[in-house]
Amino acid sequence: MDLQSRFSPELYSRKGEIRMGFEFSERVKQIPPYIFFEIEKILEEKKRAGVDIISLSIGDPDLPAPRFILEALAKEAAKPENHGYSNSRGEREFREAVAWWMKERFGVTVDPEREITALIGSKEGISHLTRAFVNPGEKVIIPDPGYPAYLNGGALLNDAQPLFMPLERENHFLPDVDFIASSKARILYVNYPNNPTGAVADKWILRELVEVARDNKIIICYDNAYSEITYQGYKAPSILEVEGAMETAVELHSFSKTFSMAGDRIGFAVGNNSLIEGIVKVKSQMDSGQPKYIQHAAAQALRTYRNGEPPEEVRNNIATYWERVKFLAKSLGEIGFECEVPKATYYVWAYCGGNSMETARKLLDIGVAVTPGIGFGKHGEGFLRFSATRPINDIMEACNRLAKLRNILH
């Protein structure tokens, strides 16, 4: 069975007979085969064959959530009143905690009533924003390479026209302001600190984005999910720190990375009140809000910040990620990959040249799983994304295995 047929709606009986199937909608047909599904399939095949796999491919935090969060979740879940429907916008306590955190962390003042909504992770905000403000056929700018949710959930499933903005290594993987100005797009998706490249955008770049967006009536969706996973004194800014950003931007945050709460599915959107209202209007028709007990625990997590800094448990996790990415980038460079030690995220974006999928397959043969750059878009070809969400001993062993295959890089 080829890759495309795995996504066929046809159902098979136990005898292998084809049952009557249903045709996908045109918007679903546009979604490209999910390369991560292909990697997972190969990974399972290797495991069944007895290959010891070290996975550096998935960006799923392996470090535990801080103890105070686990205790808060247990306490809040034990309250019967926390098991009813939540407000689509989010519980008042949660929104007030978000407003407090935005002021504490970024110095940004926002209204918890009009400029904040809870989300089931930031991915939900990506999709709902387009659904609320983009008509069929209108353009949305997708960074390339970029997080696949911008293309699939943001554009294709909402009948929007994706317009791919190349992020070039020569330009430090930063957005092209001239490209944006001439795009006639409705929405611009931006993500810094960046997945998959690990690139960062300083405030002067954000000022240029706000200026071009205001001049051209473009909505900015600023995905700031990695704002707290930063190293060596670097502090990621909020786009809402920039004058005029509240006129055109909405910023997304997630508890998945900072607090290792990926499975709890909690995040928020903050920004322009009409953009927030649009997200809430769509959201109110799609779900019944996040569980109250998770919101209450997440609110407590935000309020552990002091003087703009996270609590000790979070700082310790970030320090662990730093030691990992530092070692990983240094080792990959010695092996022959072209890469830099990132200032943020737990990814190392390494240039391998050639066919990234084929290189990833070869690495699987020696028991190392990575993500091929082509999975993030055409301009990701020739790169591999390594994730440092494994213990340092696993990363060391993976690098030892890679060192034995230097010849595949040349």
Image (tube, helix red, strand yellow):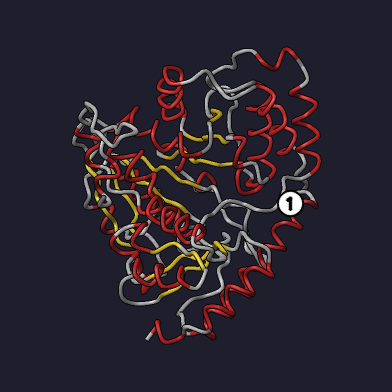
Question: In the rendered picture of this protein, how many numbered marks are placed on residues?
Answer: 1
Residue 252 place in picture, x, y as percent: 51, 40
Work out which quarter of the rendered image holds the C terminus and state it. bottom left
Residue 177 place in picture, x, y as percent: 32, 58
Residue 364 place in picture, x, y as percent: 46, 68
- Along the line of sight, which residue is nearer the eye, 90 or 53? 53
Q: Is residue 84 left or right of residue 287?
A: right
Residue 391 place in picture, x, y as percent: 68, 63
Whether residue 132 is visible, yes or no, is yes
Residue farthest to the front, as pictured? 15
- Along the line of sight, which residue is nearer the eye, 280 or 386? 386
| Residue type for callout 1 | Val
Q: In this view, does 294 lie to the left or right of 78?
A: left
Q: In this view, does 269 lie above or below 226?
A: above
Q: What element carries label 1?
A: helix
Whether residue 199 is visible, yes or no, is no
Q: Is residue 27 above or below residue 320?
A: above
Q: Is residue 226 above or below residue 116?
A: below
Residue drawn at x 47%, y 83% is: 405
Residue assigned mark 1: 314
- Along the line of sight, which residue is nearer the eye, 241 or 94? 94
Q: In which quarter of the image is residue 76?
A: top right
Q: Quadrant of residue 289?
A: top right
Q: In this view, does 295 lie to the left or right of 152?
A: right
Q: In this view, does 65 lie to the left or right of 116?
A: right
Residue drawn at x 65%, y 53% is: 62
Residue drawn at x 40%, y 22% is: 282
* Mark 1 neighbour density, 10 Å: few (under 14) some (14–19) many (20 or more): many
